[in-house]
Image (cartoon, grey):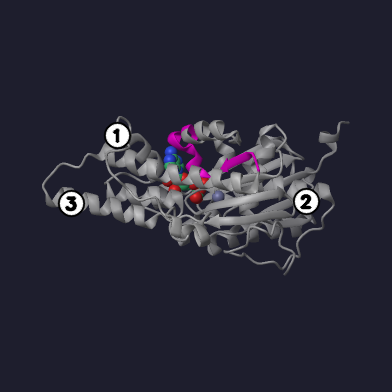
């Protein structure tokens, strides 16, 4: 039997936002990655509605667990441990996953690991088949977070260098799409609207990049000023009775977001002398972000890692991957009484307090 075959089988549950994710891994081998999204239910509100997300998790949980076990060709008896997102995320949504995980762990007498969602995004990369080289800078960009991490050791040494002080990057796409009359989720619709647009047509601010921001907010992000600038631009065009050049505005907005994300990530690589950058989160689906990251990383001599998209967006496999790593290290489970922590710090890989 090879080492991988003996590695622990871990089932991971993720419910921090609007995806019900259930993944199964054996060590660093991906066996299943099932996702049920409630995105369509939020579309008419232009953003995730926490109560609706929690309810949808409740309905999707059991069928998604069954589907993941089917995909892996496993019975619940063959699972060695359960891992679940303890935070950060929407409290009500997290509670549904944690409740399900506790139920499974108790019924089957399995060890339960309450783990960090952000660390999960980084751990997703180990499932892509190539070893993750550490230390690395990680840029995590989704509808719920925009975080820049310094990861020295996945199982215990993760430092938050900076994060958004207002909107998350994906949230900025969603809100700006609404301003432009485009559909939710905003990322893909802005990407589509930007085709053929001139990204230099509208001058838009790059949040927290002024020299005065360097001291306190060097690695933090701010997107609300950008959103407001787009709103002003739309209002001016309307007041002047001019047609809105949607492609130009979409391309200029996207460029402003991408520019700041990549510039700050590479600044972190330079500051810490780490020539590696890992991307994660749903915004990685953005073609322009990937293009700019590839070009600028090559120019800076930084090795860029981008896991496959279904491992970048929120998923249960990345949570299982963190669990498998903790089991492999011989770390004990979390106490069964642990609670959802909507603002869990990036440095806490596993919750150990009830
Ligand atoms: O990681 P993810 O699936 O989960 C949550 O945050 O729940 O990310 C979803 C976010 C949304 O805000 C969506 O607008 C954004 O990722 N997104 C994109 C693109 N595709 C999805 N943002 C920019 N460009 C895209 N192509
Ligand atoms: Zn996420």
Residue 157, image x, y percentages: 72, 54
> Position of 77 compared to 50: left or right?
right
Q: Which mark is residue 236?
A: 3
Q: Quadrant of residue 257?
A: top left
Residue 105, image x, y percentages: 74, 56
Label 2: which residue?
326
> Position of 162 compared to 243: left or right?
right
214 vs 25, nearest the viewer: 214
At 53% from the left edge and 56% from the top edge, which residue is drawn? 163
Between marks 2 and 1 in the image, the one whose residue lies nearer the viewer: 1
Q: Quadrant of the C terminus?
A: bottom right
At 24% from the left edge and 54% from the top edge, which residue is drawn? 232
Q: Identify the element where label 3 is drawn.
A: helix
Magenta part of the protein: which range?
274-291
Structural crowding at the residue carrying mark 2, measured as other residues with C-alpha within 10 Å and reported as few (<14), some (14–19) or many (≥20): many
Q: Which mark is residue 198?
A: 1
């Amino acid at each position: 039997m090879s080492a991988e075959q003996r590695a622990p089988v871990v089932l991971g549950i993720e419910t921090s936002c609007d995806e019900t994710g259930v993944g199964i891994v054996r060590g660093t081998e991906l066996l299943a990655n099932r996702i049920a999204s409630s995105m369509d239910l939020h579309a008419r509100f232009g953003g995730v509605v926490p109560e609706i997300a929690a309810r949808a998790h409740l309905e999707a949980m059991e069928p998604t667990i069954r589907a993941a076990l089917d995909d892996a060709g496993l019975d619940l008896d063959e699972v060695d441990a359960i891992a679940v997102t303890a935070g950060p995320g929407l409290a009500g949504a997290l509670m549904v996953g944690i409740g399900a995980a506790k139920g499974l762990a108790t019924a089957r007498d399995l060890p339960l690991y309450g783990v960090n969602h952000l660390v999960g995004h980084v751990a997703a990369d180990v499932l892509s088949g190539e070893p993750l080289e550490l230390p690395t800078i990680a840029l995590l960009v989704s509808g719920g977070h925009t975080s820049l991490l310094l990861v020295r050791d996945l199982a215990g040494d993760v430092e938050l260098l900076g994060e958004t002080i207002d909107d998350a990057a994906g949230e900025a796409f969603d809100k700006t799409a609404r301003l432009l009359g485009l559909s939710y989720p905003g990322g893909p619709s802005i990407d589509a609207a930007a085709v053929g647009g001139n990204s230099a047509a509208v001058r838009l601010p790059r949040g927290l990049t002024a020299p005065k921001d360097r001291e306190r907010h060097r690695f933090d992000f701010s997107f609300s000023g950008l959103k407001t600038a787009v709103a002003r631009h739309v209002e001016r065009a309307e007041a002047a009775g001019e047609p809105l050049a949607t492609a130009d505005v979409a391309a200029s907005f996207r460029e402003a977001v991408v520019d700041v994300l990549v510039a700050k990530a590479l600044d972190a690589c330079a500051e810490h002398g780490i020539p590696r950058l890992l991307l994660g989160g749903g915004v990685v689906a953005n073609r322009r972000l990937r293009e700019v990251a590839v070009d600028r990383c090559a120019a800076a001599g930084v090795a860029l890692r981008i896991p496959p998209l279904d491992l970048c967006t929120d998923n249960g496999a990345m949570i299982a991957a963190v669990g498998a790593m903790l089991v492999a290290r011989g770390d004990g489970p979390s106490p069964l009484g642990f609670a959802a922590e909507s603002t869990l710090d990036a440095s806490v890989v596993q919750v150990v307090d009830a």
